[in-house]
């Protein structure tokens, strides 16, 4: 899949939910279940990466000198 066609977080989450639903039904042949499980793990890792990157972005702020710094909630009080 080209980088320009990268799925959104929500699309990946929907795909992961569909995989989990199919596997929970228990009527998937073993080979397909293994393939689906591997795809689910890959999606899970991609979702976690996206969440981590979003968290890093949300915890940064700009100081008075225009420099990007990590937000520290304990020093904000």
Image: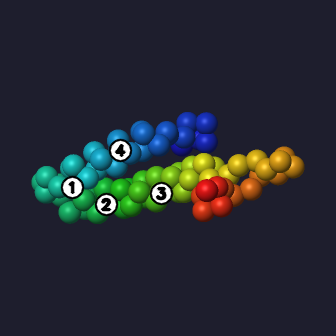
- Left or right of 30? Residue 55 is right
Residue that label 1 marks: 23
Q: Which mark is residue 33?
A: none
Query: Which comes sooner in the sequence, label 1 or label 3?
Result: 1
Q: Are marks 2 and 4 in contact (CB under 8 Å)?
A: no
If you read the primary sequence from the N terminus, does the residue marked by circle 1 or circle 2 appear first? 1
Dots 1, 2 in contact, CB < 8 A: yes
Which tag, 3 or 4, sits closer to the chain's start?
4
Work out how far the residue at label 3 is from the one at label 4, CA to CA, in angstroms. 14 Å
Horizontal arrangement in the rendering, residue 27 relative to residue 32 (left or right)? left
Q: Nearer the viewer, mark 3 or mark 4?
A: 3
Mark 3 vs 4: CB contact within 8 A: no
Which comes before the other along the chain, label 2 or label 4? 4
Which residue is identified by label 3?
A: 48
Badge 4, how many Cα within 10 Å: few under 14, some, many 20+?
some
In the rendered image, which residue does mark 4 sit on?
Answer: 15
Q: Which residue is mark 2?
A: 37
Q: Nearer the viewer, residue 52 or 5?
A: 52
| Circle 3 SS class | helix
The quadrant of the image that shows the N terminus is: top right
At 30% from the left and 47% from the top, the residue drawn is: 17
> Residues under labels 1 and 4: Cα distance?
12 Å
**Label 1's element?**
helix
Q: Quadrant of residue 39?
A: bottom left
- Residue positioned 60% across, 48% down in the render: 58
């Amino acid at each position: 899949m080209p980088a320009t066609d990268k799925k959104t977080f929500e699309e990946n989450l929907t795909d992961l939910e569909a995989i989990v639903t199919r596997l929970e039904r228990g009527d998937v042949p073993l080979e397909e279940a293994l393939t689906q499980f591997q795809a689910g793990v890959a999606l899970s890792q991609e979702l976690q990466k996206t969440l981590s990157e979003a968290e890093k972005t949300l915890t940064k702020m700009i100081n008075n000198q225009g420099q990007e710094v990590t937000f520290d909630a304990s020093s904000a009080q």
